[in-house]
Amino acid sequence: MDWNAILKEVISGSILIVVGGIAGWFGGLFKGKKESSRAIERKNEIYQPLIDEIEKYSDFDWTIREKIKVPFLKDIVNNSYKYGIRDEILDQCNYLFDIINDYNSVDSIKVAHSIIVSIFEKGYAEIYGSIVDGISYQSDRDGNEWEEEIIAEPIQVVRQSNYSKEIENLLYNEGMYSDEVCVDEENAIYMPIYIQLKRIYHLALNVIVNGKEYIKPKPTIELNILPEEYIALHYDFFEIYNNDERIKKKYELREEIIYMSQAIVQSLKETIDQIIKIYEAEEL
């Protein structure tokens, strides 16, 4: 029996086992570091940025006047293959994004403008009898004839004008009246009105046409105050605005956005917490 040969084989085998063990250890270490690096990278580049973007919508400290902008959420929803977010959170993100789109589709400024137009038309008709200024007779080449109503110039102005800044200021100051009207001089009784509405109505009622101020019809009711003051006083803008179905829906969507944002933020924070505990926690 060649003991030298046997000894060489034993030594060679031992060396292979040791080398293999060391290689396996380094391989496991490398794999662990790679997983750690990926997890930390996802925390820093996906989870935390998404939290930062939507967390501000997870409480009630914002109003329906605000347009929601969530570009990172949009990219996650539209390009989910890039991010590999687990299905539960991705489904929540999809739902939140759909709600935000529905919410943003309701423009509170445009709704307010449509209400102002409606109020002004009613007030104008009450004060001057009608919003129609006359009738024009039209015809075409085929001999067809028809009548068209001529809508009063102030009505056309309030329909077509852009009052977005004035309306935004009005909505921001709900409940904070900035002007008043004397409704009883003898007893010195004053009633509050919104200066923003008064200005809008005043500009429409005193429109300039061909370099001259539009001549309004004679009022059909007794007025002790200016027409713009009368309309601002007798038609409650915010009662109509807050009871508008579009605005009610926008408030409902806002509430859904808040609760869904809370759920997503909580899920993401739990995920980050696990990453920190596994890969970043300090050893004492």
Image (cartoon, grey):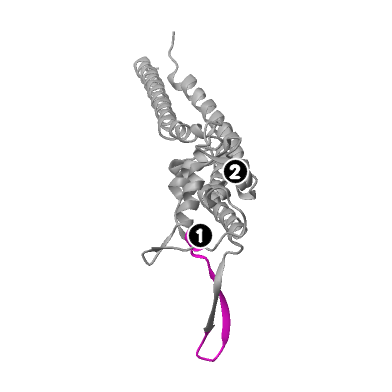
What is the quadrant of the N terminus in the image? top left
**Residue 122 drawn above or below residue 268:** below
Please state which amino acid type lies under the numbered disc 2.
Phe
Whether residue 107 is visible? no
Q: In which quarter of the image is residue 259?
A: top right
Q: Tell me whether the residue at label 2 lies in contact with that at label 1, contact meaning CB atoms closer than 8 angstroms.
A: no
Task: Find the magenta span and give its range.
Answer: 139-157
Q: Is mark 2 on a helix, strand or loop?
A: helix
Q: Quadrant of residue 263?
A: top right
Q: Residue 190 versus residue 116: which sits nearer the camera?
A: 190
Please state which amino acid type lies under the numbered disc 1.
Arg
Q: Which residue is drawn at 49% across and 32% down?
A: 56
Q: Residue 200 versus residue 230: which sits nearer the camera?
A: 230
Q: Residue at x 63, y 43 (%)?
A: 239
Residue 159 marker: 1
Where residue 236 appears, as percent x and y from the top left, is 61, 45
The count of marks equals: 2
Where residue 70 appears, as percent x and y from the top left, is 46, 42
Where residue 152 appears, as percent x and y from the top left, is 52, 65
Whether residue 179 is visible? yes
Magenta-colored stretch includes residue 187 = no
Among numbered discs 2 and 1, the one appearing first in the sequence: 1
Q: Residue 138 versus residue 231: which sits nearer the camera?
A: 231
**Residue 80 drawn above or below residue 154:** above
What is the quadrant of the C terminus in the image? top left
> Which residue corresponds to mark 2?
238
**Residue 163 drawn above or below residue 143:** above
Q: Marks 2/1: CA distance?
A: 19 Å
**Residue 194 drawn above or below residue 151:** above
